[in-house]
Amino acid sequence: MLNPDEQRATILANGQSDATNPAFDPHPVVKLFDPLGGGAWLNSKKMRG
């Protein structure tokens, strides 16, 4: 991923919190979009694997 270290740390921490707490609902950290299409994605967590 092309995220700064701070965003990467937040995304990984959100994934860890989600793994240990099923009620955890993180806010989006990164918004990705396709300027040529109609798609947009909100990234809030990444599961280690």
Image: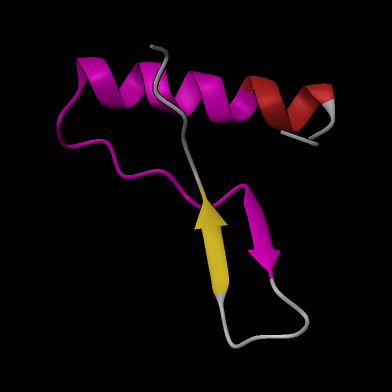
**Residue 38, x across and y down, in percent:** 59, 88
Tell which residue pokes out farthest to the front in this image.
36
- The quarter in which the N terminus is drawn is top right
Residue range highlighted in magenta: 10-33
Residue 7 sits above or below residue 49 on the image: below
Residue 4 sits above or below residue 25 on the image: above
**Residue 35, x across and y down, in percent:** 78, 81
6 is within the stretch colored magenta:
no
Instruction: Say which residue appears at 49% left-offset and 44% top-offset.
Output: 44
**Residue 21, x across and y down, in percent:** 20, 23
| Residue 36 in the figure: left or right of residue 47 | right
Tell which residue pokes out farthest to the right in this image.
4
* Front one among 4 and 23: 4
- In this figure, what is the number of numbered marks? 0
Q: How is the rendered protein coloured? A: secondary structure
- The quarter in which the C terminus is drawn is top left
17 is within the stretch colored magenta:
yes
Instruction: Say which residue appears at 84% left-offset and 30% top-offset.
Output: 4
**Residue 37, x across and y down, in percent:** 65, 86
Residue 3 sits above or below residue 31 on the image: above
Instruction: Say which residue appears at 31% left-offset and 44% top-offset.
Output: 25
* Front one among 45 and 26: 45
| Residue 35 in the figure: left or right of residue 15 | right
